[in-house]
Image: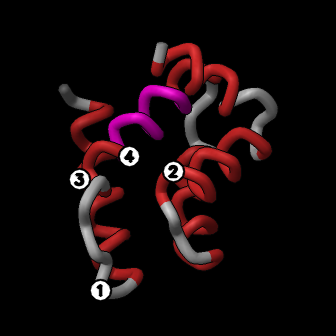
Amino acid sequence: MKTARLRADARGRDGGVRQVMATRMKLTDEQRDKIKDIVRLLASEEERQVFLEMLERELRGRELADSDELRRVAEQTWRKFLWP
């Protein structure tokens, strides 16, 4: 069920990314821009979906003190995504 929702959210290269980050991750505009920069590196829709799901799990329940903390979490998630 969640995978189907992620697929629906990821339709369109930026539209889905924006929707996922706005509705489920509660990020600021600056934070969304940083995540979009990472997501642009992913070629396929499936890869974008998987990465966003992983990032969402990592961010769940966290209070981000600043953009540097988001960057660190995103980088750690990126490493897990590339080298599981």
Q: Earlier in the sequence, mark 4 or mark 3?
A: 4
Q: Quadrant of residue 63?
A: bottom left
Instruction: Determine contact: label 1, label 3, CB under 8 Å.
Output: no
Q: Position of residue 21 (x, y in %)?
A: 57, 54
Distance from the alpha carbon under mark 1 to that under mark 2:
18 Å
Closer-to-camera residue (68/65)? 65
Distance from the alpha carbon under mark 1 to that under mark 3:
17 Å
Q: Amino acid at mark 3?
A: Gln
57 lies above or below 6:
below
* Point 55% across, 32% down: residue: 48
| Residue span colored magenta | 48-55
Could you classify mark 2 by the number of other residues whose Cα lies within 10 Å: few (under 14), some (14-19), or many (20 or more)? few
Distance from the alpha carbon under mark 4 to that under mark 2:
8 Å
Could you classify mark 1 by the number of other residues whose Cα lies within 10 Å: few (under 14), some (14-19), or many (20 or more)? few
Q: Quadrant of residue 9?
A: top right
Residue at numbered disc 1: 65
Distance from the alpha carbon under mark 4 to that under mark 3:
13 Å
* Point 58% across, 23% down: residue: 5
Residue at numbered disc 3: 76
Q: Amino acid at mark 1?
A: Ala
Q: Earlier in the sequence, mark 1 or mark 4?
A: 4
Instruction: Determine contact: label 4, label 2, CB under 8 Å.
Output: yes
Residue at numbered disc 2: 24
Q: Quadrant of residue 22?
A: bottom right
